[in-house]
Amino acid sequence: MADIKYEIKEEIGVLSESPKGWKKELNLISWNGREPKYDLRDWSPEHEKMGKGVTLTREELKKLREVLKNMNLD
Amino acid sequence: MADIKYEIKEEIGVLSESPKGWKKELNLISWNGREPKYDLRDWSPEHEKMGKGVTLTREELKKLREVLKNMNLD
């Protein structure tokens, strides 16, 4: 991971926080100077370390919103 | 990855499909026989290979739904 450059363009939302302060976050991130993508992953406090995650396009996020809207999560 | 056992309990939704047939999917998956978790990742056709992804609890998914509801994705 050491050679990957990233820039968090927008912190959109925090989904949870672990007792050690890691957070599961939805952000808009530019990887290696490329066009920013939506990104869902775990981050250590202050964003020094990252866990595995997925990047998502705007279209995928729209589809995800639709899927979630139809789920019974209560 | 070879030693990880998983069972897809429910295929909830497909967010996209690449030209090679890989799909970004939201599933409910039991890893190594444990309690199933929601899981967002890329899969090859027929689920033989998986890409990196995130697992999510029901609470995280609810929070994600809330975050997405407030986003302007159009």
Image (cartoon, coloured by chain):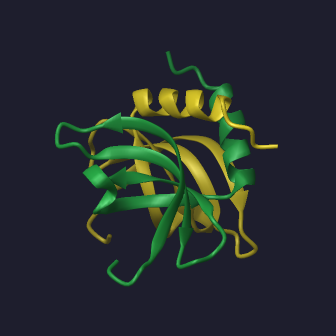
Chain colours: A yellow, B green
* Quarter of the rendering occupied by the N terminus of chain A: bottom left
Identity of the residue furthest to the bottom in this view: B3
Residue pictured at 64% horizontal, 61% vertical: A23
Q: Indicate the quadrant where residue A2 lies.
A: bottom left
Which residue is found at the position 63% from the left and 35% from the top? A68
Q: Residue at x 76, y 74 (%)?
A: A19
Residue closest to the far top: B74
Residue B48 sits above or below residue B25 on the image: below
Q: Nearer the viewer, residue B63 or A8?
A: B63
Q: Nearer the viewer, residue B10 or B49?
A: B10
The picture places residue A37, in percent across and down from the top left corner, at 39, 39
| Res. B35 image quadrant | bottom right
Residue at 36%, 35% in the rendered image: B16
Tell me if B52 is positioned left or right of A18 in this view.
left
> How many numbered discs sit on the rendered protein?
0
Which quadrant: the C terminus of chain A?
top right
Pinpoint residue A61: horizontal percent, then vertical percent: 49, 33
Image spot of residue B31 (x, y percent) = 53, 72
